[in-house]
Image (cartoon, grey):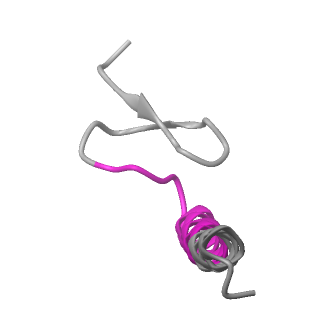
Amino acid sequence: MEPHTHCQICSKPVPLDEKFCSEKCREEYNEFIEKRKKKTYIFYVLLAGLLILIFLQLSGIW
């Protein structure tokens, strides 16, 4: 068996210099990454908002 790695989406064997077995898997991976970035951004915005509310509550401003 020749050296290989596996597709990051479907786990099919691919050559060592590739990460995906097809363009479909590459697009699916890119969509996953974009969704994860969006969720991370939303999480940090909500966290910042919560911290601001806690600060305002503790300082007696609100």
Query: Does the magenta stretch mainly form a helix, a strand or a loop?
Result: helix
Q: Is residue 16 magenta?
A: no
State the residue lying farthest toward the top. 1
State the residue lying farthest toward the bottom. 61
Above or below: residue 9 compared with residue 5: below
Q: Is residue 38 magenta?
A: yes
Q: How many marks?
A: 0
Above or below: residue 41 compared with residue 33: below
Which residue is drawn at the image coordinates 63% and 75% (left, top)?
Answer: 31
**Residue 32 x %, y %:** 64, 66
Which residue is drawn at the image coordinates 35% and 27% (left, top)?
Answer: 4
**Residue 53 x %, y %:** 70, 77
Q: Nearer the viewer, residue 28 or 17?
A: 28
User: Within the image, what quadrant is residue 48 found in?
Assistant: bottom right
**Residue 61 x %, y %:** 67, 87
Magenta stretch, residue numbers = 18-43
- Residue 57 shown left or right of residue 16 in the figure: right
- Residue 57 shown left or right of residue 34 in the figure: right
Which residue is drawn at the image coordinates 63% and 48% (left, top)?
Answer: 9
User: Within the image, what quadrant is residue 5 found in?
Assistant: top left
**Residue 40 x %, y %:** 59, 67
Placement of the N terminus among the 4 image quadrants? top left
Q: Nearer the viewer, residue 42 or 4?
A: 42
Q: Nearer the viewer, residue 41 or 57?
A: 57
State the residue lying farthest toward the left. 17
Q: Nearer the viewer, residue 5 or 49?
A: 49
- Residue 16 shown left or right of residue 53 in the figure: left
Placement of the C terminus among the 4 image quadrants? bottom right
Which residue is drawn at the image coordinates 60% and 78% (left, top)?
Answer: 52
User: Within the image, what quadrant is residue 46 found in?
Assistant: bottom right
